[in-house]
Image: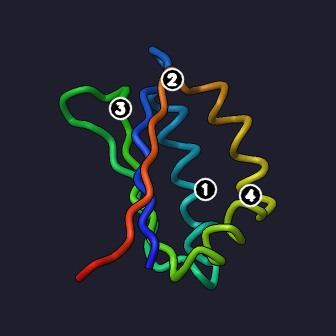
Amino acid sequence: MICLTVHITVKSGREQETADMFRSYVKLVQTEPGCMRFDVLQSRKEPRKFMLYELYRDEAALDAHRRTPHFLDYTPKMQDLTEQRESELFTHVA
């Protein structure tokens, strides 16, 4: 399995808009055949910070995710909301 974590800091005042967008987006991603898990978390200490925890069956499933219409629609919207973004890929060990 492939795990992708994404840490996002959104622009001030855009927290609720971001959370609302994620609520609808997550439902679409979770229907993808190769998606094993997709969670979005918001920091309780710093509400502008979000973390995405994405688990895919394999590299092909992650690539397929990045070609879906909902991902292609979501990407420019997130760029507009985002102040800072960091991501990292992990390989499932145990």
Secondary structure beneath label 1: helix
3D distance between C-alphas at marks 3 and 4: 22 Å
Q: Nearer the viewer, mark 4 or mark 2?
A: 4
The residue tagged 3 is: 49
Q: CA distance from mark 1 to mark 2?
A: 16 Å
Name the residue carrying label 4.
70
* Numbered label attached to residue 14: 2
The answer to whether 14 is drawn above or below residue 77 in the figure is above
> Which tag, 4 or 2, sits closer to the chain's start?
2
Q: Earlier in the sequence, mark 1 or mark 2?
A: 2
Mark 4 residue type: His
Q: How many marks?
A: 4
| Quadrant of res 60 | bottom right
3 or 1: tag closer to the N-terminus = 1
Residue 68, by quadrant, is bottom right
Q: Residue at x 44, y 79 (%)?
A: 1
Per the image, label 2 sits on a secondary structure element best described as: loop
Measured Cα–Cα span from mark 3 to mark 1:
17 Å
Circle 3: residue type: Lys
- Write down the residue under mark 1: 25
Between the C-alphas of marks 1 and 4, the distance is 7 Å
| Location of residue 45 in the rendering, given as x and y in whole percent from the top left corner | 18, 29
Of circles 2 and 3, the one toward us is 3
> What is the secondary structure assignment of the residue under circle 4?
helix
Are the residues tagged 2 and 3 within 8 Å (C-beta)? no
Q: Are marks 1 and 4 in contact (CB under 8 Å)?
A: yes
Do callouts 1 and 2 mark residues in contact (Cβ within 8 Å)? Answer: no
